[in-house]
Every structure is written in structure tokens, then in C-alpha cells.
Amino acid sequence: MTGLKGLAALGYSQAELESMSELCRRINALKRERHAVIPAHVYQRPEILAGISDFTGDSYRLAKLCAETDAETIVFCGVRFMAESAKILNPDKEVLLPVPSAGCSLADSITAADVRRLRARHPGVPVVSYINTTAEVKAESDVIVTSANAGRILGRLFEKHSKLVFLPDAWMGRNLAAELGKRLGRDLILWDGKCMVHENFDASSVPQYRKTYPGVRLLAHAECNPDLVGAMDFVGGTGDMLRYLRETEAPYYMLITECGLGELARMQMPHKNLVPMCRLCPHMKVTDLGAVLRTLECPRPSQRILVEPHIAKRARRALERMFELAE
């Protein structure tokens, strides 16, 4: 039960830990038999992160590590667009998503047809898509970005282009425009998509938190409301937020994002004082150890991620462009 040791601090009972430990043991044994690897996004359940994942991280890190793995099967603990990215980057590997219905409000906010219409309205303007998009939308895009590298990649693209289309996250787009000094609607064209988790945070309670917890460092995800972002001590992707937490000292920290990041931080850095301020993503939390075990034992057709070759080829080009520009 070594891998689950940190879960006791999150309120799990001894009986729950013992039950989860047995599930983890069976999953890890099957994983070795099937030459499988389990990537897990940082928003996943803590028992998945601590007990069965081979690597954890944000969307960029997971996409990069999936592209480098020599495993025969990838069992993706995340949501569908992430599993699709893994399949696009590993066309000859089996990619399984334990809960096929695990979706994303941002990915659902735009279609490939929408992108084609945007291109028609803005001919010749490069389309930059957040990784939280379907394979079909990626295929219609010139380059993909994540919250960790969006500012850097857009900055490089603006060196050669006077205008860009950024989709689908409107608030991230507004935050990027402010960061880069670009005009909305003229230099940067946005789509009106939002994350169902991050759209629920606002800046109204920030003064009270600063008063209640003197010296608190407030960290927010780049998908948050621009008004909230302007009141933060640090803004970035999940990987950036964890790095900031490790490298700074403060009496309190507040991570304004999905709850999974705070749970991971408490396991990795129990000496840090974390003030609760999060929202649960129902899509991220729908995957549990039982679903992963059943997937490894006998995967159903619906759990196998398939991407049409002509779509995968174009989407891969956009993802590889991200790796080129992000380094």
C-alpha cells in the first residue's frame, strides 16, 4: 500500500485504503501482462494518481510522454480529447478510455464545421487551437497549444502574423491578449467556449481570503475569468502551478482550479498549507479503479479510441507543430 500512503491525509479510511490497494495490485499486474502504460491527468482521482499511473501531468506533458512510450497499450485516465491525442500520436498502439463518456465542455463547444466557417471569415489567418478540442477540430487547426505553452507559441506566431484565431476558450484568449498586448477582435479572434469548472470562479471573494489568510499566495488556472486572473499572484497551467508551489515559500496557498490538483499537491507536499478553493470536474472524476481494472481485463469496443486516418494525419501535424514551437 506504499503508493497510496499519501491518501490517508485526504480522509480515506483504513478499509478504503486496503480495498483500493488490492485493486491497484491487480491493475498493475495486468498492466505488466498487457505491456500497457497508464497516463493520468492531474485532475484524476488521487488513488489513480498515487496507485496505478505510470506518469502524471498536464495535457502537454501527457501528450509528449505518450508520443515517447514504447508500450503496446495506453489506458488513458483522463477525458476523451486526451485519449484521442494519444491515439493520434501513437496510431499503431491500442488506446483505451475506461469511461467512453468522459468528455469536456470546452471540446464540446466547437466543431470542425465551426472552424471551417471561421477560416472562411478570416482567410489566410492561422488557427491556433487549445488542446481541449476534438480530433476533428485539431485537424482543421494550424497548431495546438496547452495552457503551459500558449503564451510562448502565440508570441512566436505573432512575429510572423498580424492576426491569429484562437479557440475555443474565450477567457484564456482574453488572458493571452492581455499578456501579449494584442487587441481582441482585430489581432486575436476568439471563440466563445468556456470550461464548466473554471467559469464558476470569480474575483469577489479574493479580498476576504487575503484578509483571512495573511500572506496567502493565490494561484489560478489560465482558463479563469480575466477579472480573477488580474487579482492573482500567479497564473498558469497545472504544471506551472505545481512548480510555483514547490519553488516558493508562503504561509498559505490557494489553488483556484479543479480539486484534483490540490489533492495531488497535498500528497506531494504535505508541509504546504493549502486553503480549499476548487470545483470538481464530473468528467475527470468519473474514472475510478474499478473502471480501469475492467478495461484491462476485457476492453469493450466503445473503450477503444479510433481516429480516422485522414483526420489523424492532419491533427498530428498540428500537434507536432506545438512540440516544435514550444521547445
Image (cartoon, rainbow, N blue to C red):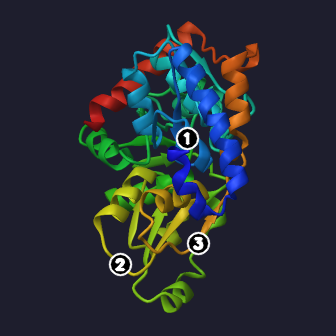
Q: In the image, residue 3 lies at what x, y percent? A: 51, 45
* 58 to the left or right of 155: right
Amino acid at the residue labelled 2: Ala
Q: Quadrant of the C terminus?
A: top left
Mark 2 Cα-neighbour bin, 10 Å: few <14, some 14–19, many ≥20 = few
Give the number of the disc on residue 148. Answer: none
- Indicate the secondary structure of the residue bearing disc 3: loop
* 131 to the left or right of 8: left
Mark 3 → mark 1, Cα distance in angstroms:
24 Å
Can residue 69 be seen here? The reply is: yes
Amino acid at the residue labelled 1: Gly
Q: Quadrant of the N terminus?
A: top right
* 214 versus 312 height, above or below: below
Q: In the image, residue 132 lies at what x, y percent? A: 55, 39
What residue sits right under mark 2 in the picture?
Answer: 250
Can residue 182 be seen here? The reply is: no
Q: Residue furthest bottom?
A: 211
What residue sits right under mark 1 in the picture?
Answer: 51
What residue sits right under mark 3 in the picture?
Answer: 276
Q: In terms of sequence position, does the residue under pointer 2 or pointer 1 come before the other?
A: 1
Q: Between 123 and 51, which is closer to the camera in this rendering? A: 51
Q: Give the residue drawn at x 54%, y 84%.
A: 209
Mark 2 → mark 1, Cα distance in angstroms:
29 Å
Amino acid at the residue labelled 3: Pro
Q: Between 133 and 44, which is closer to the camera in this rendering? A: 44
Mark 1 Cα-neighbour bin, 10 Å: few <14, some 14–19, many ≥20 = many
Q: Give the residue drawn at x 46%, y 43%.
A: 58
Q: In the image, residue 297 lies at what x, y percent? A: 70, 18
Q: In terms of sequence position, does the residue under pointer 2 or pointer 3 come before the other?
A: 2
